[in-house]
Amino acid sequence: EVQLVESGGGSVQAGGSLKLTCVISGVGRNNCMGWFRQAPGKEREGVATFDTLGRRTTLHDSVKGRFTASKDNEKNTLYLEMNNLKPEDTAMYYCAADPYLRGTSEWCFSVGSSRYKYWGQGTQVTVSS
């Protein structure tokens, strides 16, 4: 059974920090995995993706310098450390994985959210000004 379980969302003021965690089971660690978000009225967008070895990440331009994505291969767990949060970061954040996609972190990012088969339930991040 495939499970992706996110935790760590919440409400913070602008400039604050949050750390999201996603524990993945049932999907091999050497597949494309990543963080995505969807704000009300907007399409789901990639935030961070990992290469199949979990050594490199690709970040959305809007979060570079503020967010850090990491992966613990032994635990098959993803992390998203978010600093200097802005109101425009407000969204539902999801982790995703796919059993058939493998490649560089850039490629895992470029294929887009629609290619990922398995998703977590989402965790809400709200940033107030």
Image (cartoon, grey):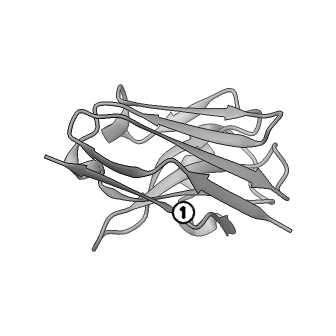
Q: How many marks do you count on the picture?
A: 1
Q: Is residue 96 left or right of residue 66?
A: right
Residue 15 coordinates in the image, percent (x, y): 23, 33
Residue 93 coordinates in the image, percent (x, y): 46, 57
Q: Is residue 113 above or below residue 125?
A: below
Residue 113 coordinates in the image, percent (x, y): 54, 63
Q: Residue furthest bottom?
A: 41
Q: Is residue 87 above or below residue 83?
A: below
Q: Nearer the viewer, residue 8 or 22?
A: 8
Q: Is residue 26 left or right of residue 19?
A: right
Task: Determine if residue 48 is in view.
Answer: yes
Quadrant of the frame with the N terminus: bottom right
List the residue tagged with mark 1. Answer: 113
Q: Nearer the viewer, residue 120 or 59?
A: 120
Q: Residue furthest left?
A: 129
- Residue visible at 50% across and 47% down? 8
Q: Is residue 95 above or below residue 17?
A: below
Residue 92 coordinates in the image, percent (x, y): 41, 62
- Residue type at the position of mark 1: Ser
- Residue visible at 85% across and 59% down? 26
- Residue visible at 64% across and 41% down? 78
**Tag 1, which secondary structure?**
helix
- Residue visible at 71% across and 42% down? 77
Task: Determine if residue 97 is in view.
Answer: no
Circle 1 packing at 10 Å, graded few (<14), some (14-19), many (20+), is many
Picture quadrant of residue 104:
top right
Picture quadrant of residue 29:
top right
Q: Nearer the viewer, residue 18 or 110?
A: 18
